[in-house]
Amino acid sequence: MILDKRTEFADAVALNTGAAGTYLIGSQLDLSEVRDVGNGKEVYFVVTVATGIEVASSTGTVAFKLASDDSASVSTTTSTVHYTSPEFATSTTTDTTTLAAGTVLFAVPLPLEGNAYERYLGILQVTGTTAISAGAINAFLTFDVQKWKAYADAI
């Protein structure tokens, strides 16, 4: 997978540890020069876990939104949302179902139609139920997604 620093939102960026709510995290991309992201070529939005995502007490959820706005401080309420991930269950450090480092949460193509992209593109973290106590993500845009997976042979 080819990665460009200029299309990276987060490089091991810690998740917001506030209460349940929506938070702007990582960096924003300035689309002032090119609004046709990818110029007709399919571009993928990828989020991976850099450091295991955990909560301190009870289980909760976390999701991510790719959103654009006319301001670099992408609004958590009035921005244009282009993609919303599924909710991922978070768990305590004593539980083995914690979102582990190295997990690819999702890799999805950016929508080429629908809501027009505004000047700044960023990521919103949506924390549900309970605050996250630890965790960091990598988030970026790429033309080629690493999708290779090993399977047992049927012999």
Image: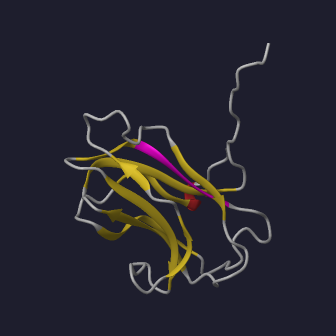
Q: Residue furthest top?
A: 155
Quadrant for the N terminus, please: top right
Q: Residue at x 26, y 37 (%)?
A: 93
Measured as percent of width and height from the top left, residue 23 is found at 34, 69
Q: Which residues are magenta?
A: 44-50
Q: Nearer the viewer, residue 33 or 46?
A: 46
Q: Residue at x 29, y 50 (%)?
A: 59
Question: Compared with residue 100, is residue 141 higher up or lower down, i.e. above or below?
Answer: below
| Left or right: residue 27 compared with residue 149 | left
Number of numbered discs visible in the structure rendering: 0
Inspect the magenta stretch and tell me whether residue 90 lies in it.
Answer: no
Question: Compared with residue 102, is residue 19 higher up or lower down, i.e. above or below?
Answer: below
Q: Nearer the viewer, residue 54 or 42?
A: 54
Inspect the magenta stretch and tell me whether residue 47 lies in it.
Answer: yes
Q: Residue at x 45, y 59 (%)?
A: 87
Measured as percent of width and height from the top left, residue 4 is found at 61, 54
Quadrant for the C terminus, please: top right
Q: Residue at x 35, y 33 (%)?
A: 96
| Left or right: residue 105 compared with residue 75 | right
